[in-house]
Each structure stands twice: as C-alpha cells, then as structure tokens.
Image (cartoon, rainbow, N blue to C red):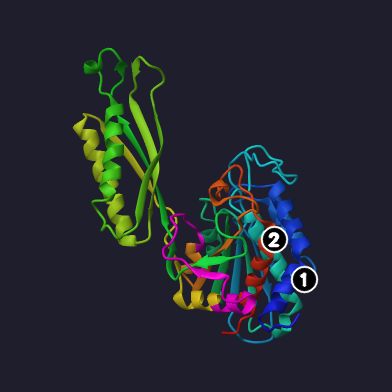
Amino acid sequence: MSTALGPDVVEAASGLQEYTVDLRRAMHAEPELGLQLPETQSKILDALTGLGLTITKGESTTSVVADLHVDRDGPMTLLRADMDALPLQEDADVPWKSRYEGRMHACGHDSHVAMLLSAARMLVENKDELPGPVRFMFQPGEEGFHGARYMIEEGVLENVDRAFAIHVITPMPAGMFFTKGGPVMASADRFDITMVGRGGHASMPADAIDPIPAAAQAILGLHTMVGRVKAGSDEAVLTVAHLEAGTTNNIIPETARMEGTIRTFDEKIRARIKEGVERVATHTAAAHGCTCELEIEQGYPVTVNDDAEVARADDVAQQLFGESHFHHMPSGVMGAEDFSYVLNEVPGSMVFLGVAPEGMEPGEIPPNHSNFMTINEDAMANGVAMYAAMAMDAD
C-alpha cells in the first residue's frame, strides 16, 4: 500500500474487511459494561500482539493504550475507540447476538474497536512513511462512566498533538461521514428530585400532604422553564424520563421521585438551566406544603470539534472517497460523549459514520441504543480507511 492518501488506502482497508467483521462480531457476542471489561480487553490485546506496539494496560480501568513509534518528530495522532456496551436485552435475530442476558452493543462500540484494530494493522505496515507517532486509545466506560477522564488522569494525552474518533450512527447513509466544527454533541447532566410529603389514606387527602400533585406541577414547570431561561435560537433539552410514586390505589405516598436529563451546547445555558431546576423544584414543593430533595449530577461536557481538525478530516475524506462522502451538519446532536474530555485538552474532531442497514426505509431503521440496533458492516471499511488516513496525513 502506498502512503499517498487516496483509493489505495480504501483498497487496503477493504482488504481487511473480513478481519474487521470477525472482530466486530466477536466483540458483539460478548459485551461488557462499565469500566471493567476484561474479556474485551483480552480480545484487543490478542489482536495487537505481534504488531510491535508499546502496549500499556490501564491501572484503574481495563483500558488499553498502544503506541506506534516512528523515527521522526512529527505530530502525535491519537485515535480513539470506546469499548463498552449497554445494559439492554438484545432482540435482533443475528448469529452473533449477545450471549449475555441484559447486555448489548447497541451503540456500535464493537464496530469502533474493530475498525481501530484494523487501522492499527494498516499503520504498522506503513510506519516508515508516517509523519509522526500514533497512539491507539481503547477506552472503557463511555456510557456514563467517564472512562476517558480516567485515561487522561493516567496520561493518555501526554505528548498528543491531535485526536480523532469515529462514532457509527444507524439512520445515516452507509459509508458517509458527518460532522461539524464547534459544538457537535451536547453536555449531559442528570437530575434527581424527590418531593417529600406526608402519607395517608387516599380518601382523606386533607390529613396528608400529597407529593404527587407537587411532582406533576414540577414536571410541567421544569419543561416550561427551559424556554424561559434561553433564547429561542439556543438549543437545549430537559426531559423528565423516570417518575415513580405510591404502591396502590388507596394510599397517598410520602414521596414522589423523578429523574431526568439536561442537554445543552453552551456552558452558560447549562448553568442557567441547572439553577432553574433547583428554583422550580424547591418552590413548587413549598407551594404544595412539601419539602424537596434535589441532586444534580454533573455529566459530560459539550463535545467541541476544532474547526481546523474538521477541515483536515474533510480534506482527508475527499482524498479517500471524493467529494460526496463528507457532509457538514447544520447543527449538533443532543447525545453526549466523553470524548469531550479529550477535545477539551487537545485539538481534534469526532465524526459520525453512517451505517444504515440495507433494505430498510429511514423510518424503519432501529436507532442507536435500540434493542434491535444493527449496522451495515460494509461501511466499516470506510471507517478503517478514515482512521488510518487521519494518522497518515502530514498537514
């Protein structure tokens, strides 16, 4: 394979397609959750064995860092793939279906790992022509466990000059890349509110303090509040997604609990919404004679792409695939990513790779995080080529 970016890189990635698919299916069949993924780590280490990389296993997690050294002082490129699955029962009927109850690779992290392992093989074969060293970052705990932050604390970003990651997304056309400069994915904070009243008989509400009306009013107030603390042109979402209260029809419970999420692209708006949640919850509780227990858990920051790195990714994709495969999104998506921690420290970009399954209309395609989520595996060859080319690019 020549190191000039172009069809030869795509051809080399396509030549590894069977290997990439086998890796992805092996990962998919044995998904693991959170920060401790020993079986996944073992598969990654097996795939990296013999490539001449300097490999470091995580201390606090089962992360893997592999360094490809070169004899020149060009920029170090970090390529990242997340490893963890979701606590979800898989219902897709495929031979490589999850073997574990209640666990599923429903967000495509299995494909991320497989694509990066194949890209590592390609880059090792061409190490003498690379502009600088490459660091492969295999990260657990993306699904809410802040895995990237643990790896940063253990030094994964030392000497890194630029970073790149791919995330597959099912509704987008297979093999196409999508991203934008600036905020590309939202921050994510979790709130937990408990209205505390006084229990009693449902036939005698005057002798109790009913927390359910307080909770209902708070939900309406929270959703209304968002539109009153931001401009109409600013994007933000608050959703109460979990509500529980009571045990049966004739008992007024003592508590009513709700929890939900806050998503924004702007840190100032993020702070204003969190202040609004506290204000609405506390004062609504007081208006109903209740007290309020409130917890707001700080989640991932906004994922902000570097404009120059997005332009570089666009140029690389054009060299690989022509002008039709890279698309600039008009706005970001409200999903959150802990690659945000990496992009807070070094310039880089995250791009989405479309993996829409063949033969499905757009409205029929199971989205990421669905129990039926599946991907078009043919698109992974483009992901492998893009991973490799972003490290091969000298600009």
Amino acid at circle 2: Asp
Q: Secondary structure at mark 2?
A: helix
**Is any atom of residue 197 visible in this view?**
no
Magenta-highlighted residues:
315-339
Q: Secondary structure at mark 1?
A: loop
In the image, 258: left or right of 289? Answer: right
The location of residue 318, given as percent across then percent down, is: 58, 77
Quadrant assignment for the N terminus = bottom right
Circle 1 sits on which residue? 51
204 above or below 128?
above
Amino acid at circle 1: Leu
How far apart, in angstroms, are the residues tagged by discs 2 and 1? 25 Å
Quadrant assignment for the C terminus = bottom right
Is residue 296 part of the magenta span, yes or no?
no
Q: Residue at x 24, y 45 (%)?
A: 279
172 above or below 262?
below
